[in-house]
């Protein structure tokens, strides 16, 4: 049986032998495409070539691309692990022709690889083509020996590929493998559901050969392209399953080592059925987490970070079904590295870091999971008391969104308690969330293939900004995105530019574009999108093709560029100082370099002490004072790495890279702009050090004149304080400490008096309660207008006082108007709860809902709030009725 490593090598070697250049996988975290959370197809990194930008003159390429898909019609996260072919992370094998070979070669080579190299049985292969593609059908018949009746035609939905609403597109040929009984195949061919391209699992789509030959125009018509292209994609996991002769992707050697290790750790055997779902979920998700974190993503509460957090929590939660009660996912990372590290060495280089990030997230989620279980128990209690037999959809969604409980877990836990769940309500909320996420991804600020006016074709934009800050340029294409009071907002691409496009953490340059006829366009930003350099501009002059058809002078704002240079060079010194002070485990995890300052994210698992921060800052300033030369050079990537140059994980590098050296302290791969000597930075000062996620710290700092302005503000603050406190600067700190001590003493006296006042007031309320006849003393009281601190002092003391004074049958509900809101508190003794059925959580919840709010708590103590203080008396009256009914039940 061929191993997955051999299958991957077969593919790469086959196309290399046919003149294809092997292109390493782009990071799974996209760098130049704001419309994508994750790289989701092999063609993503070549998208700009299809749009006409091919500066490397690439004609043939092949690669195995790391991909992630976590949403969409065929990638519902909740389905991953329940079947045997859905995945979040997967590899996409692909070969491309950019204006070179076309259908004939693509079809012949595809058939040869499948049948001659991998020896797949020809009688099980079926080809689908577009209904209009007579050329492809003729070539399938002439270039291969496939049985002609197994060449089938389908419409646009199945066999026509488009990049977007407009842009490059074309018909495709799909190669399917039949894993079923050949004798029953004919009966399925005419069935749109059970047949090929339907939903029948017996037909596995192996390879999609896309023939890019048209451009979809704005009016929907198809215009033939001057050059045709080939774009193919083949799911690696599915291919391995077919070649290795197994009926599940999870039975291939891509997953079995992980599944076997999970089985060993939990002491339970793997099962192909539903009992094996936790194994499959964990095996899939640990691969996704390993690759995404390696490439620069971090678990968080937004964007792709939120996706990672969901994946990790889902895997951790399924681990509980296998009796894992402590963090365990991180221990599987070495297995992923062992199986995948040869093809993707970056995961091995960052293995220990990935383990630490996952372990920290597991630890955090362990506590969250327990909170979720408590929340679920409270939901059940409230439902029982309300006579409901179903958990509300918004509660189910809260368990999912806040605590990581998928629907099936909540359904199972509810069933154990004799409850159902409102699945329709949950699905509505889920659909709304998906719509919000989809709309957010569509927000590309105009960076889409549609709407461009092309004036001149160029292979790419030449960047001249290292040598000069102004030059003559020509506009090659432009797009007006919208108009407002500022004028026309537009995007445009130049043949060459001095403007640095946002990349590697450095923000894009700003400046101005001046035309010969007095036209002026203010450049507000410069960005990269699929390797294109796009300038964002604003002008009050009506723009026409004629105006853009003449040369312009492009000029970068010099002061902003200089400040950015200082800050970028300072980040290199900062990383070197951190590694020297804290250790070589420090890795850059992100950065932002702009004129106002710098932000540097790095891997470290605890806050820096004041002494460490001082040492880092002092070291950077010593290197600045040393006025070290900053030298740049172009080198071969591997040679630069061998010479000790630091590369940023997740960054996409070409074969030749720019090395920025500040010998002997720093050498990094970097395309940004820098000072000529470190002395030009002037001065460096750290303004903040914080945590941004598990295992990742952030330092914010300023340089140059910004430090002088910062220190001037500090000095003015000191002058104001010395004047206000009437003390000299040497005695200032001592004077402030003395004032703090005085304030603490006064606060203690005030708390003592306030505590006595609260106790006195509660005593009067208890006496009022005791005046009621019977064995159940209770009282409902409106305390009137109060400040927040006084209310909570009484509210917090209420249940404690009831317990400490052994008022076991007492029940009290309080209300007050606090800062324009209604607040409620309740306390009850143990016998009041046990004998009379009092529940403080229900009491305050009822009151708060009447006042337009909510809240709750336990049976013996609870607090809640409402928006309308005018409803306090009415709210308290309802609790009086509830307590009165409790009293009369006995």
Image (spheres, grey):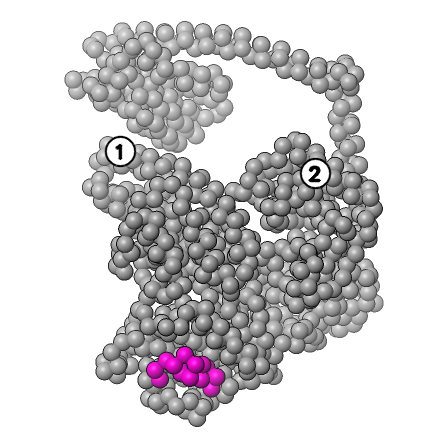
Q: Which residues are magenta?
A: 107-122
Instruction: Please tell me in which quadrant of the rendered image residue 456 appears.
Output: bottom right
Prevailing secondary structure class for the magenta stretch in the rendered image: helix
108 inside magenta stretch: yes
Q: Which quarter of the rendering shows the C terminus?
A: top left
Q: Where in the figure is residue 153, as x and y percent of width and height?
A: 38, 84
Residue 607 x, y percent position in the rendering: 59, 35
The correct choice, above or below, for 84 with respect to 580 in the image is below
Q: Residue furthest left?
A: 890
Which mark is nearer the camera, 2 or 1? Answer: 2
Q: How many marks?
A: 2
Residue farthest bottom in this picture: 142
Q: Point out the tag, 2 or 1, that comes first from the N-terminus.
A: 1
* Residue at 77 percent of width and 14 percent of height: 727
Judged left or right of residue 871, residue 508 is right
The residue located at (79%, 32%) in the rendering is 712
Pointer 1: what residue? 381
The quarter holding residue 25 reads bottom right
Secondary structure under badge 2? helix
* Callout 1 crowding tier (Cα within 10 Å): few <14, some 14–19, many ≥20: few
Q: Say which residue label 2 marks.
A: 616
Q: Is residue 148 above or below residue 871?
A: below
Q: Is residue 286 left or right of residue 723?
A: left
Q: Residue at x 51, y 74 (%)?
A: 12
Q: Nearer the viewer, residue 833 or 5?
A: 5
The answer to whether the residues at label 2 and label 1 have Cβ atoms under 8 Å apart is: no
- Check if residue 253 falls in the magenta segment: no
> In the rendered view, would you say 119 is above or below 308?
below
Q: Nearer the viewer, residue 791 or 413?
A: 413
Front-most of residues 849 and 46: 46
């Amino acid at each position: 049986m061929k191993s997955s490593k051999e299958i991957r090598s077969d593919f790469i070697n086959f196309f290399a032998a046919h003149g294809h250049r092997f292109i390493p996988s782009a990071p799974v975290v996209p760098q130049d495409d704001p419309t994508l959370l994750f790289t989701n197809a092999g063609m993503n990194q070549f998208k700009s070539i299809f749009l006409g930008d091919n500066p490397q003159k690439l004609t043939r390429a092949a690669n195995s691309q790391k991909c992630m898909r976590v949403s969409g019609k065929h990638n519902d996260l909740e389905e991953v692990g329940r079947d045997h072919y859905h995945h979040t992370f997967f590899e996409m094998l692909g070969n491309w022709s950019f204006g070179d070979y076309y259908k004939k070669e693509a079809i012949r080579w595809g058939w040869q690889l499948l049948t001659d190299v991998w020896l797949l049985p020809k009688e099980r292969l079926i080809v689908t083509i577009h209904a209009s593609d007579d050329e492809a059908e003729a070539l399938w018949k002439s270039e291969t020996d496939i049985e002609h009746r197994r060449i089938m035609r389908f419409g646009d939905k199945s066999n026509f590929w488009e990049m977007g609403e407009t842009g490059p597109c074309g018909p495709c040929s799909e190669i399917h493998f039949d894993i079923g009984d050949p004798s029953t195949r004919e009966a399925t061919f005419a069935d749109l559901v059970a047949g090929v391209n339907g939903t029948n699992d017996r037909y596995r789509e192996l390879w999609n050969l896309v023939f890019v030959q048209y451009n979809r125009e704005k009016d929907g018509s198809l215009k033939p392209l001057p050059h045709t292209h080939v774009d193919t994609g083949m799911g690696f996991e599915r291919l391995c399953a077919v070649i290795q002769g197994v009926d599940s992707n999870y039975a291939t050697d891509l997953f079995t080592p992980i599944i076997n290790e999970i089985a060993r750790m939990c002491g339970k055997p793997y099962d192909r059925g539903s009992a094996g779902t936790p194994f499959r979920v964990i095996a899939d998700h640990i691969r996704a987490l390993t690759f995404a974190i390696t490439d620069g993503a971090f678990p968080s509460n937004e964007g792709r970070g939120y996706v990672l957090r969901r994946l990790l929590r889902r895997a951790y939660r399924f681990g509980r079904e296998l009796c894992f009660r402590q963090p365990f996912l991180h221990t599987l990372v070495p297995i992923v590295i062992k199986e995948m590290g040869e093809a993707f060495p970056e995961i091995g280089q960052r293995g220990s870091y990935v383990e630490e990030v996952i372990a920290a997230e597991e630890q955090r989620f362990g506590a969250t999971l327990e909170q979720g279980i408590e929340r679920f128990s409270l939901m059940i209690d409230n439902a029982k008391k309300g006579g409901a037999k179903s958990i509300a959809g918004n509660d189910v969604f809260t368990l999912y969104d806040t605590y990581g409980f998928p629907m099936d877990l909540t359904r199972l836990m509810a069933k154990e308690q004799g409850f159902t769940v409102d699945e329709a309500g949950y699905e509505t909320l889920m659909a709304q969330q998906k719509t919000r996420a989809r709309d957010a991804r569509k927000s590309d600020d105009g960076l889409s293939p549609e709407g461009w006016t092309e004036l001149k074709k160029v292979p790419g934009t030449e960047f001249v900004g290292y040598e000069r800050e102004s030059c003559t340029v020509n506009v090659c294409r432009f797009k007006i995105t919208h108009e407002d009071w500022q004028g026309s907002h537009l995007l445009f691409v130049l043949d060459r530019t001095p403007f640095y496009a946002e990349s590697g953490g450095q923000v894009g340059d700003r400046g101005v574009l001046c035309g010969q006829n007095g036209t002026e366009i203010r450049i507000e930003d410069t960005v990269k999108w699929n390797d294109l350099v796009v300038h964002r501009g604003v002008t009050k002059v009506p723009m026409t093709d004629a105006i853009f058809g003449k040369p312009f002078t492009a000029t970068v704002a010099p002061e902003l560029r200089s400040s950015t240079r200082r800050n970028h060079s300072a980040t290199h010194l900062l990383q070197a100082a951190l590694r020297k002070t804290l250790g070589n485990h420090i890795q850059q995890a992100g950065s932002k370099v702009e004129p106002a300052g710098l932000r540097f994210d790095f891997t470290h698992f605890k806050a820096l002490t004041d002494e460490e921060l001082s040492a880092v800052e002092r070291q950077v300033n010593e290197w600045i004072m040393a006025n070290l030369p900053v030298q740049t050079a172009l080198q071969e990537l591997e040679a630069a790495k061998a010479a000790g140059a630091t590369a940023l994980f997740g960054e996409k590098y070409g074969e030749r890279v720019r090395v920025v050296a500040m010998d002997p302290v720093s050498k990094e791969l970097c395309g940004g702009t820098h000072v000529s000597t470190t002395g030009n930075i002037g001065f460096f000062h750290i303004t903040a050090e914080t945590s941004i996620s598990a295992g990742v710290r952030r330092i914010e700092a300023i340089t140059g004149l910004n430090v002088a302005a910062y220190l001037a503000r500090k000095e003015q603050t000191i002058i104001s304080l010395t004047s206000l406190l009437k003390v000299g600067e040497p005695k200032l700190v001592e004077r402030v400490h003395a004032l703090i001590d005085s304030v603490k003493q006064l606060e203690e006296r005030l708390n003592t008096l306030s505590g006595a006042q609260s106790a006195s007031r509660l005593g009067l309320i208890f006496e009022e309660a005791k005046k009621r006849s019977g064995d159940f003393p209770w009282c409902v009281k409106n305390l009137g207008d109060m400040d927040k601190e006084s209310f909570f002092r009484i509210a917090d003391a209420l249940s404690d006082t009831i317990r400490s004074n052994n008022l076991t049958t007492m029940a009290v509900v309080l209300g007050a108007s606090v800062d324009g809101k209604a607040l409620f508190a309740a306390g009850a003794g143990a016998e009041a709860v046990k004998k009379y059925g009092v529940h403080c959580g229900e009491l305050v919840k009822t009151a708060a809902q009447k006042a337009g709010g909510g809240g709750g708590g336990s049976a013996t103590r609870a607090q809640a709030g409402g928006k309308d203080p005018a409803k306090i008396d009415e709210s308290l009256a309802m609790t009086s009725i509830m307590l009165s009914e409790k009293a009369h039940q006995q």
